[in-house]
Image (tube, helix red, strand yellow):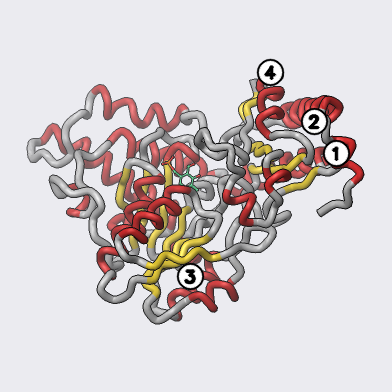
């Protein structure tokens, strides 16, 4: 099997698993307990916090462990909205955000906030001029993701955050797809809040981080026993935090080499697949995650391609049916201006860090055959092939 769906989730790293094991079997104390036995669990948690902080160029006191990217995104938006709701009600998010942001935006609208959606260009980029025009004196928060999960586009976060700050507005970025795949430095990016998810970089599922810059006004999302300095209650998932930190540290240690190697293989895949007619790469051609190759194939359904790839032992995904049973094309593909019928023929391949040239060549051969076979059977292919390209 070739697993080319690493943007959905990744295999747990053996290093992360080994780091976690003692916290399940021996050091199982509750880090909040006062007796000596809990000390090792507390030390493991704090070491994980320092390790994550080092990878992000943050302070340990700015790292808060959560249950994943979804919680971190919810917390960033709801926590800031609640803390600053008296100052202003205007929040800006981008059209290509994950549903963890979009649905939180819907919820905030019901609470009386004005959540405005920033459009993107044909590559999925929020142009700085678009943000500049949308900012208002009552804008309290901007949230734009660092890298997109469907098309891989990397946003100009540094510029966008600087514009928000010039307007005295806080800036959050969802870095769930970026961390462990491209450099993520909170000082360079200039963000106030940043979300991570462990399972996107070979850490355990159900683990995440919200980076909160010192003195950022934010209220807790989860109330209870006052853990995480009273900001995120719930008995700490020590093994999870340790696994997340070990996986992130491991990824960051070889980031530059991995990026170069995976980008080269991704480019090999993209240029071979783009030889097929009526086929496009979605997302920015250059400013994109090394691992993501995302395409649209006219006249065929993304799901049909996935089933055929699955039969050939290749795991991939499609943006057309999103994560639910809905047959609506993905909001990301519509936001970049694709017509519905084109968006329905989308496929995303997200390569793992252990991907080989042979794997890529096998994907190229299989995908080419599948697309040609399906088009040969498609009742609309001949008509589509005659049409001018949109
Ligand atoms: N944000 C982005 C960009 C994602 O791709 C995902 C997961 O696919 C999430 C947030 C949610 O993360 P989690 O699965 O850890 O809740």
Marks 1 and 4 sit apart, C-alpha to C-alpha, by 21 Å
Crowd tier of the residue under label 1, counting other residues whose Cα lies within 10 Å: few below 14, some 14–19, many 20 or above:
few
- State the residue in front, 244 or 374: 374
Q: Furthest residue to the left?
A: 35
Residue name at image x 63 percent, y 48 percent = 151
Marks 2 and 1 sit apart, C-alpha to C-alpha, by 8 Å
In the image, residue 266 above or below residue 195:
above
Marks 4 and 3 sit apart, C-alpha to C-alpha, by 45 Å
* Residue corresponding to mark 1: 276
* Residue corresponding to mark 3: 161
Q: In the drawing, what numbered circle is on residue 371? A: 2
Residue 378 position in % (x across, y down): 81, 29
Label located before the other in sequence (3 or 1): 3
Label located before the other in sequence (2 or 1): 1
* Residue 236 visible, this orientation: yes
On screen, residue 139 versus residue 3, left or right, reads left
The quarter of the picture where residue 212 lies is bottom left
């Amino acid at each position: 099997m070739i697993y080319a769906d690493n943007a959905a989730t990744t295999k747990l790293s053996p290093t992360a698993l080994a780091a976690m094991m003692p916290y399940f079997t021996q050091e199982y104390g509750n880090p909040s307990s006062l007796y000596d036995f809990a000390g090792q669990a507390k030390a493991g948690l704090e070491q994980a916090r320092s390790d994550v902080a080092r990878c992000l160029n943050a302070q340990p006191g700015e790292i808060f462990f959560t249950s994943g990217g979804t919680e971190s995104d919810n917390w960033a938006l709801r926590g800031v909205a609640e803390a600053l709701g008296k100052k202003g009600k205007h929040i800006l998010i981008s059209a290509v955000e994950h549903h963890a942001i979009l649905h939180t935006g819907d919820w905030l609208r019901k609470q009386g906030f004005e959540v405005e959606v920033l459009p993107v260009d044909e590559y999925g980029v929020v142009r700085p001029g678009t943000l500049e025009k949308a900012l208002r004196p009552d804008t309290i928060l901007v949230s734009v993701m660092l890298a997109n999960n469907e098309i891989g586009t990397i946003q100009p976060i540094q510029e966008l955050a600087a514009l928000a700050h010039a307007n005295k507005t806080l800036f959050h970025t969802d870095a769930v797809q970026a961390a462990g795949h491209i450099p993520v430095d909170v000082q360079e990016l200039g963000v106030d809040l940043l979300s991570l998810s462990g399972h996107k970089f070979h850490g355990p599922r159900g683990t995440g981080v919200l980076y909160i810059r010192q003195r950022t006004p934010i209220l807790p999302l989860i109330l209870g026993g006052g853990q995480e300095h009273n900001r995120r209650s719930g008995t700490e998932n020590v093994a999870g935090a340790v696994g997340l930190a070990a996986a992130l540290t491991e990824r960051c240690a070889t980031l530059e080499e991995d990026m170069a190697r995976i980008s080269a293989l991704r480019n090999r895949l993209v240029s071979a697949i783009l030889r097929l007619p009526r086929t496009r790469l979605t997302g920015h051609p250059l400013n994109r995650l090394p691992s993501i190759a995302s395409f649209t194939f006219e006249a065929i359904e993304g799901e049909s391609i996935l089933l055929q790839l699955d039969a050939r032992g290749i795991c991939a995904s499609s943006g057309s049916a999103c994560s639910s049973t809905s047959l609506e094309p993905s909001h990301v593909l519509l936001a970049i201006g694709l017509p519905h019928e084109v968006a329905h023929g989308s496929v995303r391949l997200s390569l793992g860090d252990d991907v080989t040239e042979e794997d890529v060549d096998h994907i190229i051969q299989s995908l080419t055959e599948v697309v040609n076979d399906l088009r040969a059977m498609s009742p609309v292919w001949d008509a589509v092939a005659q049409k001018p390209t949109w």
